[in-house]
Image (cartoon, rainbow, N blue to C red):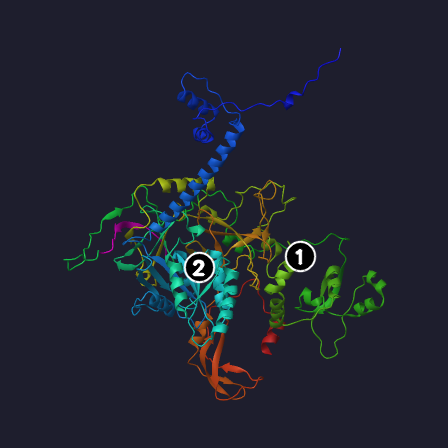
Amino acid sequence: MAEAHHHRPTLKQSNKRFKSKHSTKSALKDAAKGGKHSHIIRSLTQSHPGRISRTSPKASATTNASAQTRLNRRNNAKQAQAKKRDALVSATRVFSGVDGAPRIVAVIPLCPDVDAKAIVTSLADALEVSADDCPQTGLWKIRAGRFKTSLQFINVPYRNFYAALDACKVADYVVFALSTSVEVDGWGDTLLRALQAQGLPEVVTLAASDSTIDTKSRIGILKSLLSFVQYFVPSQTRVFDMYVSSDRLNALRALSEGKPTDVRWREGRSWILGETTEWEDGQMKVTGVVRGSSLSANRLVHLPNFGDFQIAKILSAALPRHPKSGQTEAMDTEPAVLAEPDAEEADSLVSSNDPDDLANEQTWPTEEEMKGVGGLEQPSLPDAEVGTTPQRVKRIPKGMSAYQAAWIVDESDDEDDEDPDAKLQGEEVEMEEVTQEEEEMQDMPMDEDIESERRVAFEDLDNEEEERQLNSWRNRQREEEDDLQFPDEIDTPRDIPARVRFQRFRGMRSFRTSPWDPFENLPRDYARIFQFEDFKRTERGVRRRAEQEIAVVEPGNRVTVILKDVPQQAATTGPVMIFALLQHEHKTSVLNFTVQRNTEYDGTVRSKDPLLLCVGPRRLRVNPIYSQHTRGGGKGANNVHKFERFLRHGLTSVATTYGPVIFGTQPCIFLRETSDIQEDVHYFKPIQLHTKHGRTGHIRESLGTHGYLKAHFDGPINQMDTICMSLYKRVFPKFSTLWTISSEQEITATDVDAMEE
């Protein structure tokens, strides 16, 4: 029986189910917002009671999930955009309004022919504001009504390195003023590198006005200046020309609008730039606007160049209101007390512990005991046993030491040079006959080791020449090269015994695995510092308590801070800047910094060399030691790090020193402390110069920072001539003291003859 033909069931057509007028795509989409498939069924059931709700085959779970994902992305984008807008408004709110804080602008000239006051005057002319009262250095405030804000300029003089560093620490904007005709010298290059390491806020670059440059050359000069600035500040896209009026206005717009760039090390900290300063009876009143974070009266504050101080109280200092119509005088408000320190919660000025010597369990000898080791009378070595050390007897002049006797050449020595087998004979030798005069002789036994040393070539030098050669050999460059070629090797000293030089060292089988007690043989300074069980946990607790503190002054308020026990000099030295410290940041502990050498510095940097440490608002004179930087917390189970004698190029090292505690990641700069050569040149300016060929002249000015100077002479100077300056001083003899004869000192006949000669 033949089977009937059937079509495949997959070819059967299935029509769409009927949907009511409330079940359109848009209705289902609106119903699915914020819910799942069950919400659609609930909506349809409520719209048509008594009817069995049916779901569309397109309204699957996958389709609704993808639609929900797109909606979530749009919603998240809107929330992020709103959050950024609110952050920008809140960040710029401190500058807006009648009583808004001014935007601090630090003007840094980088060339000798650029004047900070001239730059500020050009910017003020663009706002049609008179700059007659603008000082050459210091603070000056103007109102930028066109941009609805205020600008407070800090005019920094040229070649004032530390004033530029301090001004950039409190500034919202930094203006680098360049010249169109003079290049940036070495001082400006060093300043830019230091500011780059310290952390820069928003940067605006200006070119000083110069009418002598034509338009075609001006474009190329501005491009060259932009390329130079981008090496230090890559975010720069333009150099504003102060000769062009539109550029002056655009520079003001860059300074007056937008949000300044945050400096990382200032996060969570507050600072004040003093607009006015008063000093009375040891208390200094500093008036300014609180910036950054909230200011607490219980915390200490730091004044650059003067140290840490306590806050007596914080008063309000609102700006005087402008008189309204019908009023003749401005309305002044009485200052109110905003915050006072709590006697129990306020930080003290105690920075170190007072060590208790009686409770100290260290058994290491003191410095006085170690110095006395060299003066102790050492017992004489016993004679060697018979047959172990063959001795020879020499006939020498009376009074001659064993060292001098070893260099006397006698007949047997000449024979030894000819016949090496004669060394084994060991016969008694006699001195050469003295033909000119006879001397009193004596016998002295000689050791074979001393005799063997005599055969080494030796040139007897006087003390001055020997010291000169030794100092020439032990120069810093030679020591660094030797340390690089032979690491972990030290020559034994000549002036002190090796047992004294290396008495602090200990023998270990393995630096990585041998047991090492970290509390063994600690110096006395460790009893003075503070130790933290968990530094990170302490930092989190300090920041949490700072956020939860109630009696604080919020940023944006204009206040008067009264400091206690401040020297009067602090009120008269430039713009006063106050930096608030966190809790425990006045305590002294051990600081570790990860450092790298600047590639432009060619000199040697040795451990314990005096350096100037710039970290945060502080500047400290330190003598750091360097050690290897090992990732992962340490090397081996001991967590010890090998000491490095020199700070080398291309390597990251850890610098360790004593100093105040610092929370957070702070940028640090180590500067070589040098004398002010420019002041030295001005000091000798009144003295006349002369040359060996008879020319005379005078010093005119100093050039650079390496002691170069400009001088005028009465004629041309030969290249083989030498410039001299005659300096004299009086010298006086020292007082005589009584000299006594000790039991170990005897005047021999040789000494008497030397004195008579």
Q: Is residue 691 above or below residue 742?
A: below
- Asked if residue 215 can be seen in this view, the reply is yes
Q: For the residue labelled by badge 2, is the local secondary structure a helix, a strand or a loop?
A: strand
Q: Is residue 392 left or right of residue 673?
A: right
Q: Which residues are magenta?
A: 305-320
- The disc placed on residue 203 is 2
| Residue at screen point 54% across, 63% down | 742
Q: Is residue 523 above or below residue 421?
A: above
- The disc placed on residue 486 is 1
Type of amino acid under label 2: Val
Q: Nearer the viewer, residue 529 or 468?
A: 529
Q: Is residue 409 above or below residue 270?
A: below
Find residue 361 and report its horizontal and vertical position in percent. 49, 42
Q: Is residue 94 left or right of residue 404?
A: left
Other-residue count near label 1 (Cα within 10 Å), few / some / many at <14 / 14–19 / ≥20: few
Type of amino acid under label 1: Phe
Q: Is residue 443 left or right of residue 239?
A: right
